[in-house]
Image (cartoon, rainbow, N blue to C red):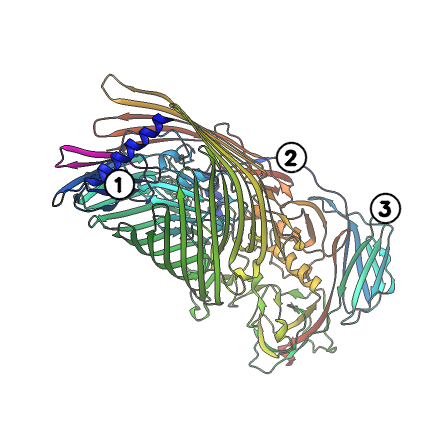
Amino acid sequence: MKERFYYTILLVICSLATIGQEHISISGIVLESDTKKAIPSCNVIVRNGQTRLKTGTISQGDGTFLIHIKKSPGETVDLQISHINYQNKSIQLSADKDQQVKIYLKHKDYALSNVNVYSDHLPENRGNVFSFSPEQAKSSISIAGEPDVIRHLSGLPGVAQGIEGTLGLFVRGSNNGSNRVEFNGVPFYSYSHLVGLFSAFPSEVIKQSTFRPGGIPAQSGDLSSSILQITKKKAKADSLKGKISLSPYLVGAYLAFPLKKEKVSLQLSTRHSILPYILNGIADLNEDEDVEEEQMKAQVMDFTAILDWQVNQHNSIDLMLYASNDYFDFKDESNQNKLNWGSKVAKLAWECQLSPVLEWRTKSYFSHSYSARESIYFNEYRSDHHPESQLKLGTKLNEWCVNSELQYDFTDRLKMTTGLNYQNRAFHPASEKTLYEQNSHSKSSPDLKVGLLAAYANFRYHIPQKMELMAGYRHTIQSGDNSSKVSNFDLRFLADIYLHKKMGIELTFDKLTQYYHVLEGLPTGWSLNVLIPSSDLHPEEVTKQLYAGFFLKEQQKDINFQLTLGAYYRKMKNLLSYKNSINLFGLNDATWEDEVDVGKGYSYGVELSGSLQAKKLGATMAYTLSKSDRKFKEINQGKSYPFKFDRRHILNLQTKYTVAEKINKKNQKVKQFVNAVLAFSTGHKTTLPVSSYQGVLPPYWNQRANGWTLPIEADNNAYHRQEMTARNAYKMKDYFRIDLAYTFVKYRKKSKRELSISIFNVLNRKNPYLYFYDEERWQQLSIVPIMPSVRWSLSF
Amino acid sequence: MKTNKLCIVLYLLLGACVEDIDIENKWEQKIVVNCTLDTSSVQILKLTYSNPLGVHYYDEVETATVSLYEDSSMLGHFTKTAYAHWELKYRPRAGKSYQLKVEVPEHKEIRASTTMPFPLQISKANGNDSGTRKHLNQKMANSPYWLFILRQKKSEQYPMNLTPQVSASDELENQLGTNHPFSDHFNISDPAESFIKQPFDMYIRIETPEEKAETPHDFYIEGRLSKCLLFCRAASPEYDRYLKSSIQKILVYEASEDPSQWFDENEVYSNIENGLGIFAAYSDHILMYDDDWGI
């Protein structure tokens, strides 16, 4: 006891002596340059003249540090920050007064360097935040053999996939169109290739993807289910980097190079599918075989260009141009059918560090999304084969947006982000008919113009390993065609409370509002949907959601383990649904309004996720037990019915095992690893005919004019009726799939070669896409059987 | 034809596979009642059983008590007059509500109700009528209604009886058009095959919004109209829903081999409690045209 007393006295005396020597403090925070997230465990040292070490420290869990040095009027010191995953940074500071600094570190380029990542979930993942890099997304083996950040979502808890093999993602019982997908801060309404089989974002330009099904910050709006934010990679502005990749589905090229060393860099990426060329070749062969007038054309491509300009230490600008296009065209002597969808985006953003605690970010973008099915009918009696009529179905959306926000750090723990966002949109939904020779009678839906103004404020209070609190408010005003002025507010709340260093609880509440609807012709995630703005007739979608969960993190030697377990309840209103989507897909309706109904939805469930990361083995697991219902006035006689993707059980397992990592005889580093994926989910719901019964014929049906014949199936449906199950009352066969992949990576002095061999659905299980009754028997259509793929890439 | 060959190609491209399957049979036999009341003096009802899917020969219900009520007062019982065919001599009255009760031994009591619509107040209007365009005036339409045309092929004689009469040789016109502002576009057809700018397949459905039901509307119809009967059929809500959903279902199968039919989940409307079928009502107002005789 006495000893402790003397010790304290000594410390006080030493402290007083130090103060007497006139010291200054250098405090600050270290942040990641792209995401603005705090970086803990950085080495922070202060040197005088690059030689003599004055003092040093390590940044805390929240990225902050504090160093005291002797006051030296007229002198400068170097503050140097280093971290194994980030590029070093050094700045000069005056040593005659206290200094407060904010340091931004750039991430080292993982995709092009010799770093292997085993885990699929970063340590910060909890029940409502899942972040992953493209490298980690590889653990979800995609059909195309490419890392696919959208497909990776289907392996996360709370996410039900759509119809077999497609990218429809139904988060916590919501519609696919209620998700918001942002790439480099720009929302995308069309983001899939080849009828929804893989995403339109090239992995080479992606740094990280963050998925949030709840606890969504107020900065993100105009969504009613979840958000996926895909951040771009920032190319090194000092060297040339590139990549070429080849697979049976896609051929890709990526190039990153400095335009002005250390200042301006440019990334270019393009991907094309070679499948269409094979199709075109088949079509050409057919021509040789005298199959007259039949022509097939197709194209699948995307292009991304990103320019980063580090104007100075405090200002940076980025410019992005993006285009994707899917086009399929089949023509014969009587008609021509075309499918076309894609996006074109231009974005300019400016980030400015006004002071160590105040940052201003502003961006503006223009995006053009489109999807269309077009049918052209030819006049067979005209020699010039002139088109006589045209029928279009689909949507077009032009959107421009200006966003400006300020981030102010009250303290190292309390931060506020506030901003304004204005979106101007012109929707062009629905069908269109044109008679080429009677233009005065052409019918075309007018553009529906909508303005959306949002103001938001989001507060975040964070004490590492103790708590994270987030509260956000977003107020939005919409006005436009077919809509009175509408004003709504969103509330967002998240609380992570650590009960112990390794475990805690998470609570979230979200009130989300979405000001557009996506009418899904086919529930596949395929972009061939109709986008319409909310209006008086079809009010904005509103979702309220509660989540309560538990998280655990454990680290022992080389093993990291984490677990999340939580339950949610979600209530959705003003959902839009086709009464019968087939009526629009089959082009029987001239207006989409006739087939649309407004209703409600409910969903609740339990989500469990876990990840294990060892030196050679990484594994993740996600399980969801959930129920989701819908209620529409004019569907199922107004009674509640199961949502089409009300999958009771969803289980996803992913593993990655490093088989070998060694130096070969040529002194080259070589790595081999295998991936395995298991996906199981309860079958989706459908409505089926169960019996036949006598019908009442339409008036004078038997007196139709001679020669006016219909296919036998149509005539059958005039005389006979089909008794259908209640809406979505039939559960299809469970979905089950195992995928395997083997990857061989060879590192050379300045390049990396990678060969991946993957087999999607290795068991060749015929999972149901749909059931149909044809030729007096039940049949099942499966579209994704066993699909092997080989992908070779060269990075330099 | 709307054959979607492109879809077929895409499915083939992906190695799609179609195979026969056995699915759990959820079929159970039910009683089917079909009765559409009209303005004639005899009402007809069909009473059959449902069948497994695809079996299109229907067994009759041999024994049943079928009663019709008007505003809850019994009007009488239907009598079986032929195979599955039941009749009741009664002419329904516009605006009255009717209830049907069918009792079959060892089955739950079957019930349904409907309302007899008022006849439409539609008349020929002055306009530059031609053989392909006729002008009309709608004075009042309190219920949805349907327009269709029977083209008369028989007899060049002056029609002695100016009361419209349907002959077995009359033909239902394939395509007709209108400029009515409240026409339902659900069955708009391929314009390439017609001289009509916006042709409807055989029937035009018109649903005037409630607030404009009593506002007169001038409009025209188009088709081959030089010698025809124009039917203006006022429909009870049940008849309207049944007919529209029936035609929607037919239209799905209008093209052969269109894979989009595999997604068909259309259900034809039924208002029969504890059974299947339809109990509905309509009232026809028929206009006769004969350009040869200036009618």
Q: Which residues are magenta?
A: A46-59
Residue A278 falls within the magenta-colored stretch: no
Name which residue lies at 72% across and 54% down. Answer: A695
What residue sits right under mark 3 in the picture? Answer: B106
| Residue in the foreground of this view, choosing between B190 and A373 | A373
Q: Residues within 10 Å of mark 2 (few under 14, many from 20)?
A: few
> Is residue A567 rendered to the left or right of residue B164?
left
Q: Position of residue B124 (x, y in %)?
A: 63, 79
Asked whether the beta carbons under mark 2 and mark 3 sit within 8 Å of each other, the answer is no
Instruction: Identify the secondary structure beneath mark 2.
Output: loop
What residue sits right under mark 1 in the picture? Answer: A105
Task: Classify residue A143 by image quadrant.
Answer: top left
Compared with residue B165, is residue A416 higher up or lower down, i.e. above or below?
A: above
| Residue in the foreground of this view, choosing between A381 and A202 | A202
Q: Position of residue B68 (x, y in %)?
A: 84, 62
Q: Is residue A740 visible?
A: no
Say which amino acid is labelled 3.
Glu
Compared with residue A81, is residue A351 higher up or lower down, i.e. above or below?
A: below
Instruction: Identify the secondary structure beneath mark 3.
Output: loop
What residue sits right under mark 2 in the picture? Answer: B22
Residue A49 falls within the magenta-colored stretch: yes
> Is residue B61 rendered to the left or right of residue A789?
right
Provide the major secondary structure of the magenta segment: strand
Q: Is residue A291 visible?
A: yes
Residue farthest to the bottom, as pictured: B126
Residue farthest to the top, as pictured: A665
Say which amino acid is labelled 2.
Asp
Q: Residues within 10 Å of mark 1 (few under 14, many from 20)?
A: many
